């Protein structure tokens, strides 16, 4: 007899999550009560108009910002109850970030940029292996100025992935890239999700990107409007731009 299928514990769970910036008449309600459950190992795309709260949610789940009210858990650990030093350890040990702008050190090679992270990580992969994973193993000795925008973003992804995080948070990772280069970066994110089982949460304005996700969350005005699960997914190279 086969064992009953178990529902995996969620990677993230939020209840009534709010975030207000400022006070009184100047208050901005960036999140207005977000209830969310995300299983581990998925590639999730967050869509929504500018200012709808996507980055705010990403930053709270990534331990970069704090909620105003409500709870957020990573696995069984409550992020919203952590001290600053606990959040620092959470970010260091569990989380990788990729932003629109690559934030590479211009005076360091691709490999040295990745090493900056692996030197302080708990369970890093070799920097060369991380660069191989993003297809840049042969360019490891190049400086950022000698790489295209898409290649620099792939170095940034290698840097985020090299510490073998459980979760990769990506905020507009293709925002500064042309369509061909953007697709190549999306393919790298999909490869990371599949090869390493890393949960990937990606905020984007590129709505077509939703077709490659397992799950698509649409935001409006600080709340989740819809959550869809894709029965079939497109390959990044099939995505219209
Ligand atoms: N540090 C801050 N101080 C004050 N207001 C902020 C701050 N960060 C975000 N906001 C406001 O909170 C709201 C939500 O912002 P957020 O960046 O989460 O939206 P977004 O959906 O990610 O937008 P975009 O797609 O433009 O990045 C916006 O009105 C924004 O101006």
Image (spheres, rainbow, N blue to C red):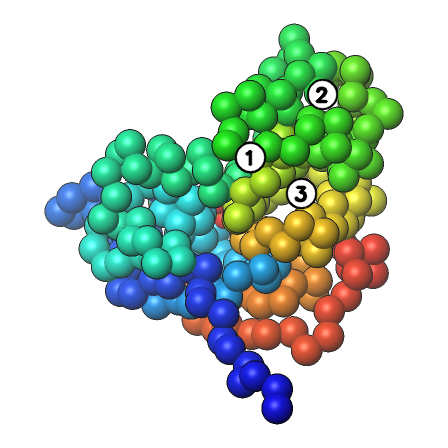
Q: Earlier in the sequence, mark 1 or mark 2?
A: 2
Residue assigned mark 2: 110
Residue 105 lies in quadrant: top right
Q: Residue at x 64, y 24 (%)?
A: 114
Q: Is 222 left or right of 122, judged from the image as shown?
A: left
Name the outermost residue toward the right.
138
Q: Position of residue 84 (x, y in %)?
A: 26, 34
**Position above or below: 204 against 1:** above
Q: Which residue is mark 3?
A: 174
In the picture of the structure, the residue carrying the numbered disc 1 is 123
Measured as percent of width and height from the top left, residue 211 is found at 69, 66
Q: Quadrant location of the C terminus? A: bottom right
| In-front residue for pair 4/128 | 4
Viewer-nearest of discs 1 and 2? 1
102 vs 2, nearest the viewer: 2
Q: Residues within 10 Å of mark 3 (few under 14, many from 20)?
A: many
Using residue 135 as the reference point, say whether residue 84 is left or right of it. Answer: left
């Amino acid at each position: 007899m086969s064992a009953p299928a178990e529902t995996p514990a969620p990677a993230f769970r939020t209840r009534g999550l709010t975030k207000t910036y400022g006070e009184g008449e100047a208050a901005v309600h960036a999140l207005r009560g977000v209830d969310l459950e995300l299983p581990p190992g998925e590639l999730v795309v967050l869509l929504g108009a500018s200012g709808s709260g996507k980055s705010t949610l990403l930053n709270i789940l990534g331990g970069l910002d704090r909620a105003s009210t409500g709870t957020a858990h990573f696995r069984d650990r409550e992020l919203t109850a952590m001290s600053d030093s606990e959040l620092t350890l959470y970010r260091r040990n569990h989380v990788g970030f990729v932003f629109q702008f690559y934030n590479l050190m211009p005076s360091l090679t691709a490999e040295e940029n990745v090493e900056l992270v692996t030197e302080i990580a708990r369970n890093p992969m070799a920097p060369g292996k991380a660069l191989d994973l993003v297809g840049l193993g042969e360019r490891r000795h190049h400086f950022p100025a000698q790489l295209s925008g898409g290649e620099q973003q792939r170095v940034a992804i290698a840097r985020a992935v090299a510490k073998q995080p459980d979760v990769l948070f990506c905020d507009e990772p293709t925002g500064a890239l042309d369509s061909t280069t953007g697709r190549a970066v999306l393919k790298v994110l999909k490869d990371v999700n599949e090869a390493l089982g890393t949960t990937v949460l990606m905020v984007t304005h590129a709505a077509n990107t939703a077709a490659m996700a397992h799950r698509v969350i649409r935001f409006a005005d600080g709340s989740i409007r819809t959550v869809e699960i894709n029965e079939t997914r497109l390959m990044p190279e099939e995505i219209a731009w």
